[in-house]
Amino acid sequence: MSPSPLAPAPNALPPVLFNVCFALCVVSVSFFPAAYIAHAWIYDANGHGIPTDFVNVWAAGRMVLEGHPALAYDWDLQKQIEVALLQQDFVGHFAWHYPPPFLSVASFLAQFPYPAAFIGWVLLSIVPYLAVMRAIVGRTFGLVLAMSIPMVVDNALVGQNGFLTAALVGGTLYLLPTRPVLSGICLGFLTYKPQYGLLFPVALIAAAEWTAFCSAAITAIVLALASWLAFGTESWQAFFHWMPMFSQAFLTEGRAPWWKLQSLFALARYFGSTEQLAWILQWVLTAAVAVTVVTIWRSRVRYSLKAAALAVGTLLTTPYLFMYDMTVLAIPVAYLVRLGLAGGFRGYELAALACALVLSMSFLFLGQPVGFAVTLIVGTLVLRRAGPWWRRAPARGHATSGDVGDFQRA
């Protein structure tokens, strides 16, 4: 037999991959206790709360507990609670803009003291993320890989929900071939960040995954009804009232500096583009990604690559994307690592992943909008693995047995 273009030892974990990931894992795990002791996380040296994103979660939850869930969407009223909590003022707003179902999470966390809620949220949300990464990779190394992603630090540092988003995206994709109902439930819960659900219905329809599609729709409806019963009509009215203002502030006025957003839209604005041109570029990219995802999901490409392509496309199609949201990129990376461990890595893959890793880490130190380039690198690796996917004959119905085997082989 002629020598394979892949690494000669399938199922072997490349030492360089393990060593780099293990080192980064140790750094991630040790960083936060050290930062807390050094007064660089949650509280500063004066005992005042450090203004970060999690404060809006706790403040919104406090308003719910006080019987005013609709007021959580009022920027000025919420800031008053945040300033009182942190015992110091700050520039701008940490606004609450999630759909009402997520108020249940906020109200639960607000029952605890702020530092306990902050740390508890990070620990609680990272568990399903680690579980999904372990399941996708198919071995314990998935836990090390999960903690080595630089976005782990970005997310935990500000108490954001990147772990939860990645867990729901990964859970939806991992469970789809074997547990479509549970997959749909995960997708239904993802409606707490609806901008990441744009491509999923398109892919499910293209692949005729009607069970997951219906399960997701039912879950989303149940969550909406439950939140309506719990928090009233006023909370939904407030959500829709404040959303245009939020969009105006962040996508038109640039209240958050453009380098903090990692989409093509924000990258164009960062380099001085007009808003109109930025939107044109973003919508052209979204259309191209949607066509690509549909073509891949209708082809006979193995399921791991379909899942990876959809996860990457999820990040490319939204203009509102922070670095902590890019924790989702761990999902397609996990699928690529799974394929590499099963059949060997191609010569350029580890080098390309290393490049993406360095770019991601540079964000912590340089504050440059590198996220879009990182996403493109991972997306290119997925397409290269898929080969001439546009020539593959359309698949009939659900995933083939070979696709399901992608999951069942550990």
Image: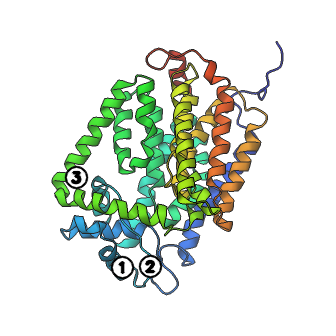
Where is 343 relative to 336, above or below?
above
Query: Which residue type carries mark 2?
Result: Gly
Where is 222 relative to 326, above or below?
above
- In front: mark 2 or mark 3? 3
Separation (CA) of disc 2 from disc 1: 7 Å
- In front: mark 3 or mark 1? 3
Residue farthest to the right, as pictured: 2
For the residue labelled by badge 3, is the local secondary structure a helix, a strand or a loop?
Answer: helix
Q: Which residue is mark 2?
A: 49
For the residue labelled by badge 2, is the local secondary structure a helix, a strand or a loop?
Answer: loop
Q: Which residue is mark 1?
A: 85
Q: Nearer the viewer, residue 44 or 282?
A: 282
Residue drawn at point x = 62 percent, y = 51 percent? 372
Q: Nearer the viewer, residue 389 or 35?
A: 389
For the residue labelled by badge 1, is the local secondary structure a helix, a strand or a loop?
Answer: helix
The picture places residue 129, in percent across and down from the top left corner, at 48, 47
Separation (CA) of disc 2 from disc 3: 30 Å
Where is 232 relative to 81, above or below?
above
* Residue 227: numbered disc: 3
The picture places residue 15, in percent across and down from the top left corner, at 75, 42
Q: How is the image coloured?
A: rainbow
Q: Check if mark 2's residue and mark 3's residue have beta carbons within 8 Å.
A: no
Q: Check if mark 2's residue and mark 1's residue have beta carbons within 8 Å.
A: yes
